[in-house]
Image (tube, coloured by chain):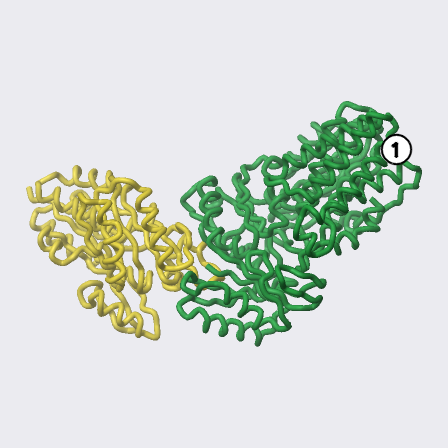
Amino acid sequence: MGVVRIVTDSTAAIPAADQQAMAITVVPLNVHFGDQVFRDGIDLSEAEFFTRLKASPRLPTTSQPSVGAFEEVFRPLREAGDEVLSVHLSAKLSGTFGAARMAADAVDPEHITVVDSGTVAMAMGFLVLEAARLARQGAPRAAITQRVEHLLPRARVICTIDTLTYLERGGRIGRAQALLGALLNVKPLLGVTDGEVLPLGRARSRAQALDRLVEILQRDGKLSHLAVLHGGAENDALKLRERVASRYPELTIPLAEIGPVIGTHTGPGVIGFTYLTA
Amino acid sequence: MAWLTANRDEIDALNVFPVPDGDTGTNMLLTLQSAVEEIHGIDETHLGRVVKRVAHGALMGARGNSGVILSQIFRGISVSVENRAVVDGPGLAQALESGATVAYRAVMKPTEGTMLTVVREAAHGATARASQTPDIVDVTRAACEAARAAVERTPEQLDVLRRAGVVDAGGFGLQIILEGFLKRLEGEPAVAFARPAAHHAAPRAVVAPETGWGYCTEFIINGAGLPLDEVRAEIARRGESAIIVGDESAIKVHVHTHEPAVVMAYAQQIGTLSRIKVDDMSAQHHRLQGEASRQPRSLKHLGIVAVASGRGFRQILESLGVDSVVEGGQTMNPSTEDLLTAVESVPAAEVVLLPNNGNVIMSAQQVPPLSDKRVRVVPSRSLPEGIAALLAFDFTQDLEANATAMGRALKAVRTVEITTAVRDSAVDGLQIHEGDVIGLLNDRVVAAGKARPPVIDRVLGRIDPSSVQTITIYAGAEAPELERETVRRQLAERFKNSAVELQAGEQALYPYIIAVE
């Protein structure tokens, strides 16, 4: 009997080095600038993307991987005798989970488990890395799945974005609709909870928004994983990490830049935290 | 009541602040009117029971700080005479003392030289006289004389009165009310007062809609031996947000129902109806539906009610998540009942109430004990403070945590208001003439002049630009389009490192309200 292979999608934004080291297979979503299609994280780097996003007269759109794309990944893994655990971004935000499950049904539902992480970005990345770690130790698929499902409710994404425009145009605004307002100089605070983008509050300026994010982070107490999330805002992200690092001496806190697909929906300048509570 | 009506304008004119909020007389009159309407046409001669109704009416109708204090005086009087069928001089003196005590207790920081001083002095005057005679007319006359003397002394007690050369408006209003009472005791006929026409309006032909929010239905059932509990149960069954108060002789009904005709038909079997008012809430609801339907119910464990004047401000507040905006502000203070009705209409069990005006805070603070809901008042003194409080609203936190955070946030905003002086006056060394443009910073007049842009510049000149992140200009209905842009550019120039935003508040009387954060 083979090992358990971990599959995820590009919105987890797992650094290429980690993907290789942990033998994680990443299926890309797509970004469309007009007629041009780019595979998330493969044809388009984060830096290239945000430059293009700011310059593009038309907003890009995104699309999920096809069922076929998942089948092409699952089939050879099964043929090699391996089992598969495939972890994806919230089904409430994307059809990716659905496509993966259809592919699993077509290939071999008995030996492929597809999990809806209910979250995005590095919060999902942490779950995937944990699954990969257990898989390398030879844990069975059921045990890894159980561990991932156990961690799911602890995953948090909190962030502030410069404008709700991107989220609204992309149709992913969900309950954060409540934050749409008449006032211009207001920074929305958002979170992803139970798979949905939820409003957390508002702030009068980016500085105040960052203060509020730090407050919310601290309210969640002890953490097992923490990353500073950002989209084209590396300097701000470094400063934000500096602010909180001393409170979590036991954690290494990576900067996790969001990829083009999530960036299409947040717009440039997004910044925040993604973490698992202890 | 008639005497107060006749003197209202004079009381209004006594307001020392040159901003157009000269409405102490109006507020006291509306409060008293609500008190009197509560006993209008009732068949009751037991003094204690009549006064209890008066006190209740005053509380429901209380507008502005003066109205709230007046309602508290009535409450104290009511407690004192509760078990008395009639009252004599000493009884009246005791009641006035009780009124003064309750009124003092109701005010957080009692200030001498106000209505409070006048009611206390009137009570002392009455008590002194009552030790010599049981005659109620004599005792009342003594109370009036003491009140008059106390009013005359108010300028000695309050600097702001002395400089403006006026007596305290609320105190004077109270003196007038006592004098009106004396006139009746001395045999002058009661004068019928004109009640607002709206209260006499016949109900429209109403058809219960299949869906929607139904009709806000209000009326009073008059009669004898009315079964309050039964009426309460029967009417509450047919609608929502029912507020049904009263006794055997009159029951005041407020209910939101789809079938106002059915409710009124039932009530007509019980007694005769008066002060009927039926408002179609669906019409109001339709306007908001686009907004509301986007917001899932589950978010609404916490509702927000706010007071505002101006179409633009209403929209801004609604866009920030306010469920019900009560029209009102500087010149038209909403009553406790208006606020209570709004709180009851919000589909949430916990409600944050934002008065957004210094004169509305006290009426707002009367609401929590009157409502079955958990209500917290966040004491915002201006719309910018209210908006700063709303921005601090945290969707993930509960009522208490939000009320605390909002209360803290509003302190971070400075409010600038630009308006026109309604009378000549001298404030803090500024000579102000009627018609001048005046600029206020956190409720204090700090600049005056002939044109708005330079006055704005002088007020904002008092603020250190390095302490400012955001400036929001809310242009009022009277601000011309071109001038709005001029003001925006002028402030963007002065506060180079701040975000300056121009919004249409469309508020009355204040061409500009500016939030500095």
Image quarter hosting the C terminus of chain A: top left
Residue in the image at 57% along x and 76% along y: B482
Outermost residue to the front: B156
Residue in the image at 42% along x and 54% along y: A202
Disc 1 is placed on an element classified as helix
Q: Is residue B437 left or right of residue B30?
A: left
Q: Is residue A232 left or right of residue B192?
A: left
B330 lies above or below B485: above
User: Which of the two residues, B385 or B261, is positioned nearer the viewer here?
Assistant: B385
Specify the subunit that label 1 lies on: B
Chain identifier, yellow in the render: A
Q: Amino acid type of disc 1?
A: Val
Kindly tell me whether residue B190 is visible in this rendering.
yes
Residue A240 is situated, as x and y percent measured from the top left of the image, at 27, 55
Residue B230 is situated, as x and y percent measured from the top left of the image, at 70, 28
On the image, which quarter does residue B246 sit in?
A: top right
Q: Which residue is mark 1?
A: B137
Residue B495 is situated, as x and y percent measured from the top left of the image, at 44, 69
Residue in the image at 43% along x and 47% along y: B395
Residue in the image at 48% along x and 42% along y: B301
User: Which of the two residues, A171 or B365, is positioned nearer the viewer here?
Assistant: B365
Chain identifier, green in the render: B
Kindly tell me whether residue B283 is visible in this rendering.
no
Q: Is residue A3 left or right of residue B466?
A: left
Image quarter hosting the N terminus of chain A: top left
